[in-house]
């Protein structure tokens, strides 16, 4: 089956009353790439306009696109309509689903189920924050990237991907003749969902039912006492405990799961965050609640908001400021790079050449007219801004290029990709100098230490990964010299202080860690953001750290004490990146709200 002249369906993976799932090939990308296509159809009459369906799907698709940076969700790549049927194109995730794993290995134990909960609850929380109800959480929709046997042998179930996010919610919006029709799996669906009234807590119910299925190995229909309207699953599990300690752990987990699968919505745990805190407590992980900082009078103000990126896909993923602080470059899902005049606050021109979302951008440290960009099309492009043309295309990564950066002396280029590799390039010749491998999951961010000749420090490259680690590489030997561990989830941002003494890291666990590079020890853990931290940058004097977060804020921190100085509020969606123009006292922030905001201290605020 040929779809939209780009995709070729090769296998039907599954089919329901309102949708079909196809394994397909994207024939445009080289090499040919597997993808998954959800084929959705509405029960509206032929006289009903398709426009309303398309508009609802566009809105739902925009919500799902906000989640694409999570390594635990498949990326939504495209959508199109053909012959009155809507198609959503998703990233293909290879691996075993938990239903298959259960059939192969048998039942899961207490520790394994707790690991699964810790892995999935943060991503469920992210989904709910975006206003999306998954609606169909079940073992078949939870994919383990590595084989279930390997996970069982290693005792680790953290590398899980949740698929089919928001599909049931989108279908519900398309069912215009039956708006309260139940959509999802009746085996795992909450009572209110089966009546056509799903809530965020419905997903927690489905997650709980999934867990009791994994623990007992018995189909959930056989675990529910329909006469007394209650679950009877514990009778099939608690008796398997080997000793008193294990029985206590089982009882604690059982009590938590009972609160998840409570049929009465008013008696059920309402938020994924609350469940996660209880699971962490069961595992002996006590997280302190950050002390709220008193409100302060703003000393920073937004003096300009840059708009221009547009279309269905227009998230701004990254920004960079030129060495002379005159220009700002922004990279977007609209496949463009836009150049802005910082002083005037206006767009200068747009670069078009990437075939897919542009994820990262950086200026050469000594040349204001040399720019580099990386994209989901797997290429790195070098641009001459005077001629507004591509002067070099670097191809070698097998997946999305998430980070590109010139070395401090501008001699070579580093790139990090979802293919788990860091590559160092001689950008002038387009040749790979070396490939650095060490991350178990996608490389998400890169940072060079300051020029060793100026700082007296070892010349290092730091790479952050979705495997929750930060790797430090010696740029003379190209050897890994240290692995920094401490984060509990995807690390999204990394930055060296100007003197090279400290390293800042941050990510999905909502914390920022400041490391002393001499001892490789954490000196401060900064807690204040309520959602994943996506961007970090030091001020030129190294005394202030700037962070951007999915909580829509930019925060300024005092490095010496680790205390929050100020919060900058104004974006209406997740902050994706930050940048600093040192000689102008200016901070720039980019957001999924499709805007870039320029902030200055009140002292520098232009007068009218």
Image: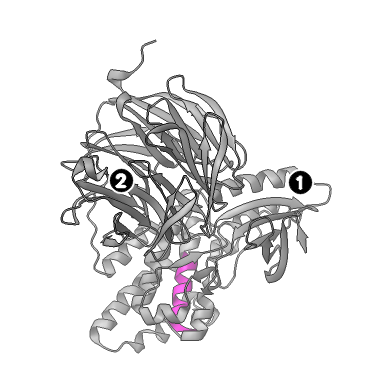
Q: Nearer the viewer, residue 482 or 211?
A: 482
* Secondary structure type for disc 1: helix
Q: Is residue 539 above or below residue 33?
A: above
Residue range in magenta is 205-218
Between the residue at mark 2 and the residue at mark 1, the CA separation in whole angstroms equals 48 Å
Q: Which residue is mark 1?
A: 50
Q: Which of pointers 2 and 1 lies earlier in the amino acid sequence? A: 1
On screen, residue 477 versus residue 215, left or right, reads left
Residue 305: x %, y % from top left:
46, 26
Place of residue 423 in the rendered image (x, y in percent of width and height, measured from the top left): 43, 56
The residue under label 2 is 495
The one nearer the camera, 541 or 422, is 422
Helix, strand or loop at label 2? It is: strand
Q: Dot 2, crowdedness within 10 Å: few (<14), some or many (≥20)?
A: many
Up/down of 525 relative to 579, above or below: below
Instruction: Please say whether residue 6 is visible from this viewpoint.
Output: yes
| Residue 23 picture quarter | bottom right
227 to 428, vertically: above or below: below
Pointer 1: residues within 10 angstroms few (<14), some, or many (20+)?
some
Q: Is residue 208 magenta?
A: yes
Can you give x and y, in whole percent of width and height, for residue 510 in the image? 33, 51
Quarter of the image that includes the N terminus: bottom right
Q: Does residue 182 appear anywhere in the picture?
A: no
Quarter holding the C terminus is: top left
What residue lies at 32% left-to-right and 66% top-to-bottom?
279
| Residue 387 sits in quarter | top right
Q: Main secondary structure of the magenta part?
A: helix
Q: 82 or 182: which is nearer to us?
A: 82
**Residue 203 forms part of the magenta stretch:** no
Residue 50 horizontal/vertical position (percent) = 76, 46
Q: Specify how the rendered protein is coloured.
A: one colour
Residue at the (53%, 77%) spot, across then down: 99
């Amino acid at each position: 089956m040929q779809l939209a002249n780009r995709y070729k369906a090769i296998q039907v993976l599954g089919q329901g009353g309102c949708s079909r799932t196809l394994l397909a090939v994207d024939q445009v990308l080289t090499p040919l790439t597997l993808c998954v296509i959800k084929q959705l159809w509405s029960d509206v009459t032929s006289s009903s306009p398709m426009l309303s369906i398309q508009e609802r799907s566009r809105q739902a698709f925009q919500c799902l696109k906000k989640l694409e940076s999570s390594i635990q969700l498949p990326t939504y790549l495209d959508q199109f309509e053909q012959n009155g049927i809507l198609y959503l194109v998703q990233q293909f995730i290879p691996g075993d689903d938990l239903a298959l794993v259960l059939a192969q290995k048998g039942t899961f134990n207490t520790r394994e189920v707790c690991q699964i909960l810790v892995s999935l609850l943060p991503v469920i929380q992210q989904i709910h924050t975006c206003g999306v109800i998954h609606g169909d959480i079940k073992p078949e929709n939870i994919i383990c990237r590595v084989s279930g046997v390997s996970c069982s042998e290693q005792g680790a179930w953290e590398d899980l991907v949740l698929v089919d996010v928001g599909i049931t919610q989108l279908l519900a919006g398309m069912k215009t003749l039956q708006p309260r029709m139940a959509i999802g799996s009746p085996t795992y669906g909450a009572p209110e969902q089966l009546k056509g009234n799903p809530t965020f807590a419905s997903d927690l119910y489905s997650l709980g039912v999934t867990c009791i299925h994994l623990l007992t190995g018995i189909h959930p229909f056989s675990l529910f006492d329909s006469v007394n309207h209650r679950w009877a699953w514990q009778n099939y599990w608690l008796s398997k405990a080997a000793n008193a300690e294990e029985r206590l752990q089982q009882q604690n987990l059982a009590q938590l799961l009972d609160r998840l699968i409570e049929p009465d919505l008013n008696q059920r745990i309402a938020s994924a965050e609350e469940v996660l805190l209880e699971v962490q407590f069961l595992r002996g992980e006590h997280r302190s609640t950050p002390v709220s900082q008193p409100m302060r009078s703003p000393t920073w103000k937004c003096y300009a908001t840059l708009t221009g990126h547009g279309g269905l896909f227009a998230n701004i993923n990254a920004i960079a400021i030129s060495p002379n602080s005159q220009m700002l470059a922004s990279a977007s899902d609209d496949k463009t790079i836009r150049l802005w005049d910082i002083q005037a606050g206006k767009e200068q021109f747009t670069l078009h050449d990437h075939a897919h979302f542009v994820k990262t951008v950086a200026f050469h440290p000594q040349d204001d007219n040399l720019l580099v960009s990386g994209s989901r099309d797997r290429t790195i492009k070098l641009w001459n801004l005077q001629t507004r043309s591509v002067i070099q295309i670097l191809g070698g990564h097998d997946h999305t290029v998430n980070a590109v950066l010139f070395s401090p002396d501008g001699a070579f280029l580093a790139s990090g990709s979802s293919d788990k590799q860091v590559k160092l390039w001689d950008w002038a010749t387009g040749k790979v100098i070396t490939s650095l491998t060490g991350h178990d999951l996608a490389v998400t961010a890169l940072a060079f230490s300051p020029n060793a000749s100026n700082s007296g420090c070892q010349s290092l490259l730091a790479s952050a990964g979705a495997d929750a680690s930060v790797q430090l590489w010696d740029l003379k030997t190209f050897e890994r010299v240290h692995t920094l561990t401490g984060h509990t989830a995807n690390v999204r941002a990394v930055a060296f202080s100007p003197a090279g003494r400290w390293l800042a890291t941050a990510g999905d666990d909502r914390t920022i860690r400041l490391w002393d590079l001499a001892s490789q020890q954490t000196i401060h853990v900064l807690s204040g953001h309520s959602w994943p931290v996506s961007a970090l940058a030091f001020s030129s004097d190294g005394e202030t750290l700037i962070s951007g977060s999915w909580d829509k804020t930019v925060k300024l921190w005092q490095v010496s004490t680790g205390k929050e100085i100020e919060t900058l509020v104004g974006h209406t969606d997740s902050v994706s990146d930050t940048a600093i123009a040192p000689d102008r006292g200016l901070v720039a922030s980019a957001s999924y709200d499709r805007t870039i905001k320029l902030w200055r201290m009140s002292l520098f605020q232009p007068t009218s």
